């Protein structure tokens, strides 16, 4: 039911009072209106632009974001409005949908952006009103085609190369000659032989020289052997090509039925039939006709020329227009032929002997050829003849533009696809650069982080601060994430720095623990708004973290003079078996503040708000833990005060 | 010429309702309620009046299964108290005021007005039959139990037996009110 009509529902219900006197059975009870709120204005702030509407307007569609309680997630307590960080232009359309019940699609809007907005607000695109639905569907289809195109060419390019079988590689080589040099060679060789074969066929019939007896012989009969050899060679190449294609085709049955394969067969059949048949006089007539089919070899060129393919495709897609053209022409021919025949019947020695004979005249006249072999002699014939030629021009001129426009459309589509493919190369290159750039940044920061650790061990905190300034919060968190992944899988990203590679492989253990710490930090920063919440599910992380941070703390006090990476290796291994005491929490908060993945902020006593620490205190610490992370401590363990002998974590070396 | 003039009229009509205070005095609604009512009304009919076709369209959206055009026609006539072919906001409010906030007497009066198609003060059997058929039409064909051909007629007979006190074949307003209040 449309939204606006809902406004009339109370009216219809009131009018139902008219049924009461005539009702057979008593009326049912009316549904109670629960929680009848006074209608209030709500403010929707979309990227700064404020929209206001009644609450009931939005509640007309309870299964969308704005109509349900989902919008409470976007409620801003300070300003008492709902804030959405989305496009205000599209929001206008969406709000109008609530108001009028009709969803419109603005033409200037990009289809994918619009779809995203609809998805965000929980509105199904099918609701788009009739006025805009067609436009929307057209644009959507275009976009889908473009995406499919992209995906196809992407798949072609990336291609799971190693997993392709020999057969598949061959098929790809046939279809796309640019995949390998061999394919290109094959492409050109077949092209050459097609040309040779066609030229042979043509030259065969040219008369060259005379033979004593004053008879002109065509070249074909004079150099019969030479031509036969050429023909054999060509046909052999074509046969081999056909068989190879048949072998490589993914679906042989479909390949056999395709147009190109039929052309191939028709092109080589006459030769074999000629071989089989002897010089039998009565069949040789038929045999000569078969030779005509050799000219079909010229169609094999369509594999080599895209323009030909487009032309063929156009004709196929304009089949209805062509059919109409043919039909109307036939009608006109019959009409005019009949008229001309009866008009010329009177004149003597008229060439218009019958209606079918007049067909020839009509066709020649309508297409404005005018050979002149058949000419009307009577006055009536001349009059009708002129009408015939005038109408011919019109009838032919009508369907032709349709065919032309179809061809133009398909041709431009192809051009656009080619352009996109060319641009895609540049685009992919850019994406690759960006990817390598980000992984370089990651590795760079890793190196920085390790350097930081080295520095901090020497006690120089100033340089450390300098190093950490470069990375932003998002970047450092991202790098931390990549690092976690590395640790999870046990692999590491490709490194081109030999110094770095040594470090990364040996200090695995240490870094793993660090991650837990920083994982916990990340979660902490998100917990900022809920200082009083207890989250037992995070207990494992917190437990680890407390152990980690305390270990860090310990590490700093134990090894103040370790500065060289080589010795660090040994110290790490020592650390790995150290018993750790869970101690003060403030270090956690301080590490959060610095936001650098590798720096140890446990040293710096910049304690942040104490509230956070109270939250952590209540979280239980695991009694025993292995850094592989397989055994998570039971979340149900009761919270206890932290410093206790039981909270000793044994960290074993990986 | 008629239709062209009608179209012109419809296109240029921009009916403005009387002042809010006046309507408040005339009906039993509060200002706020009138505001809400008008907003809904104006949203659906921006020109300010409802003509019969729009009315039928709106009503048919509530009863999608059956054919509610006949009943909507009768209902429209009941609302269109000044019989000018269109229901303005004042008519709308007046009708609703009676239906929702009126006394039983007023409501029954309104119902009588609905049944009395030619507004002559008497409900005849034919009028009642028309109304009944219209109501049954709204139900549509797929009902349980299946609608019988003479069900409306039967219903009318029952109704007249109950209402028509002096058995003169017509029901007057007093008979109607009396029988309904029993």
Image: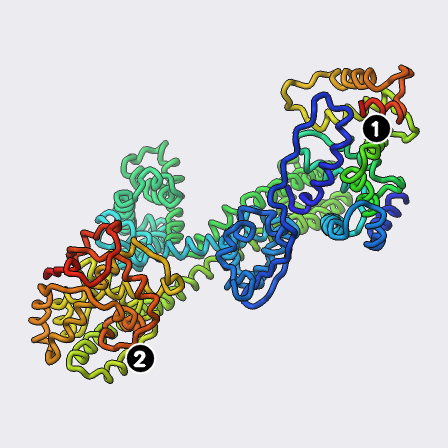
Please, is residue A490 above or below residue B177 in the view? below
Looking at the image, residue A613 lies above or below residue A17: below
Instruction: Count neighbours of disc 2 (C-alpha within 10 A) and say few if under 14, some if 14 to 19, many if 20 or more.
Output: few
Can you identify the residue that label 1 sits on? B115
Q: Which residue is nearer to you in this view: A113 or A640?
A: A640
Q: Quadrant of the rendered structure where residue A552 is? A: bottom left
Q: Is residue A256 visible?
A: yes
Kind of element beneath mark 1:
helix
Residue A469's tag is: 2
Instruction: Report, in whole angstroms, how far the alpha carbon at label 1 lies from the one at label 2.
Output: 85 Å
Residue drawn at (81%, 22%) of the image: B129
Q: Chain of mark 2?
A: A
Q: Residue at x 34, y 39 (%)?
A: A256
Q: Chain of mark 1?
A: B
Q: Secondary structure at mark 2?
A: loop
Percent across and percent down for residue A110 are: 53, 60
Q: Identify the image quadrant of the C terminus of chain A.
A: bottom left
In this view of the protein, which residue sits in the foreground, A397 or B145? Answer: B145
Coloring scheme used: rainbow
Q: Nearer the viewer, residue A332 or A572?
A: A572
Vertical placement of A131 versus A485: above or below? above
């Amino acid at each position: 039911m449309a939204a606006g009509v809902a406004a009339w529902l109370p009216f219809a219900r009131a009018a139902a009072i008219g049924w009461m006197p005539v009702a057979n059975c008593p009326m049912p009870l009316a549904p109670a209106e629960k929680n009848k709120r006074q209608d209030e204005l709500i403010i929707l702030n979309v990227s700064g632009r404020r929209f206001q509407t009644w609450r009931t307007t939005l509640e007309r569609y309870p299964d969308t974001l704005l109509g349900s309680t989902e919008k409470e997630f976007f409620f801003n307590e300070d300003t008492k409005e709902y804030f959405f960080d989305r496009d205000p232009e599209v929001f206008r359309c969406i709000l109008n949908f609530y108001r009028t019940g009709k969803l419109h699609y603005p033409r200037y809007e990009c289809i994918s952006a619009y779809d995203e907005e609809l998805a965000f607000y929980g509105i199904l695109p099918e609701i788009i009103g009739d006025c805009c639905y067609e436009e929307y569907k057209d644009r959507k289809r275009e976009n889908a085609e473009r995406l499919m195109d992209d995906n196809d060419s992407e798949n072609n390019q990336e291609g799971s190369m190693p997993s392709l079988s020999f057969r598949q590689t061959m098929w790809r080589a046939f279809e796309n000659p640019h995949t390998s040099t061999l394919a290109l060679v094959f492409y050109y060789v077949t092209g050459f032989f097609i040309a040779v074969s066609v030229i042979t066929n043509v030259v065969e019939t040219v008369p060259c020289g005379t033979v004593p007896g004053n008879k002109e012989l065509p070249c074909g009969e004079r150099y019969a052997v030479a031509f036969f050899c050429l023909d054999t060679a060509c046909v052999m190449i074509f046969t081999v090509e056909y068989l190879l294609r048949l072998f490589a085709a993914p679906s042989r049955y479909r390949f056999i039925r395709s147009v190109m394969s039929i052309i191939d067969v028709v092109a080589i059949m006459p030769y074999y039939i000629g071989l089989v048949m002897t010089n039998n006089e009565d069949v040789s007539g038929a045999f000569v006709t078969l030779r005509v089919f050799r000219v079909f070899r010229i169609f094999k060129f369509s594999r080599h020329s895209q323009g030909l393919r487009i032309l063929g495709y156009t004709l196929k897609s304009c089949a209805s227009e062509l059919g109409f053209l043919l039909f109307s022409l036939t009608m006109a021919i019959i009409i005019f032929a009949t008229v001309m025949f009866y008009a010329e019947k009177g004149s003597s020695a008229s060439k218009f002997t019958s209606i079918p004979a007049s067909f020839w005249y009509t066709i020649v006249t309508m297409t404005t050829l005018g050979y002149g072999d058949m000419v009307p002699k009577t006055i009536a014939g001349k009059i009708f003849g002129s009408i015939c030629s005038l109408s011919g021009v019109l009838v032919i001129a009508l369907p032709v533009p349709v065919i032309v426009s179809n061809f133009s459309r398909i041709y431009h589509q192809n051009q656009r696809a080619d352009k996109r493919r060319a641009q895609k190369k540049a685009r992919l290159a850019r994406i690759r650069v960006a990817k390598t750039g980000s992984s370089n940044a990651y590795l760079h920061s890793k190196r920085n982080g390790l350097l930081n650790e080295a520095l901090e061990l020497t006690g120089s905190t100033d340089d450390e601060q300098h190093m950490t300034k470069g990375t932003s919060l998002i970047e450092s968190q991202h790098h931390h994430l990549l690092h976690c992944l590395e640790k999870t899988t046990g692999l590491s990203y490709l490194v081109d720095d030999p110094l770095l590679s040594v470090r990364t492989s040996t200090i695995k253990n240490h870094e793993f623990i660090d991650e837990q710490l920083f994982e916990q930090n990340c979660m902490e920063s998100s917990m900022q708004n809920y200082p009083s919440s207890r989250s037992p599910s995070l207990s494992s992380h917190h437990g680890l973290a407390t152990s980690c941070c305390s270990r860090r703390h310990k590490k700093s006090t134990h090894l103040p003079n370790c500065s060289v990476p080589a010795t660090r290796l040994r110290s790490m291994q020592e650390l790995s078996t150290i018993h750790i005491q869970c101690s003060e929490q403030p270090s956690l908060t301080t590490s959060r503040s610095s936001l650098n993945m590798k720096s140890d902020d446990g040293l710096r006593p910049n304690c942040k708000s104490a509230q956070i620490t109270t939250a952590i205190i209540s979280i239980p610490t695991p009694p025993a833990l292995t850094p592989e992370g397989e055994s998570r401590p039971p979340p149900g363990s009761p919270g206890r005060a932290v410093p206790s002998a039981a909270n000793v974590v044994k960290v074993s070396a990986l | 010429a008629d239709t062209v003039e009608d179209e012109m009229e419809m296109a240029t009509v921009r009916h403005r309702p009387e002042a809010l205070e006046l309507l408040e005095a005339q009906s039993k609604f509060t200002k706020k309620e009138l505001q809400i009512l008008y907003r809904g009304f104006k949203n659906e009919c921006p020109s300010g009046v409802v003509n019969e076709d729009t009315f039928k369209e709106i009503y048919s959206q509530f009863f999608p299964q059956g054919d509610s055009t006949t009943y909507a026609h009768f209902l429209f006539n009941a609302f269109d108290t000044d019989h000018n072919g269109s229901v303005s906001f004042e008519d709308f409010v007046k009708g609703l005021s009676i239906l929702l906030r009126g006394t039983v007497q007023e409501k029954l009066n309104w119902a009588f007005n609905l049944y009395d198609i030619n507004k002559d003060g008497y409900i005849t059997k034919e009028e009642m039959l028309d109304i009944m058929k219209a109501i049954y039409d709204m139900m549509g064909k797929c009902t349980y139990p299946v609608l019988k051909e003479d069900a409306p007629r039967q219903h009318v007979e029952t109704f007249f037996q109950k209402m028509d006190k002096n058995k003169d074949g017509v029901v007057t307003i007093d008979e109607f009110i009396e029988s309904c209040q029993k």
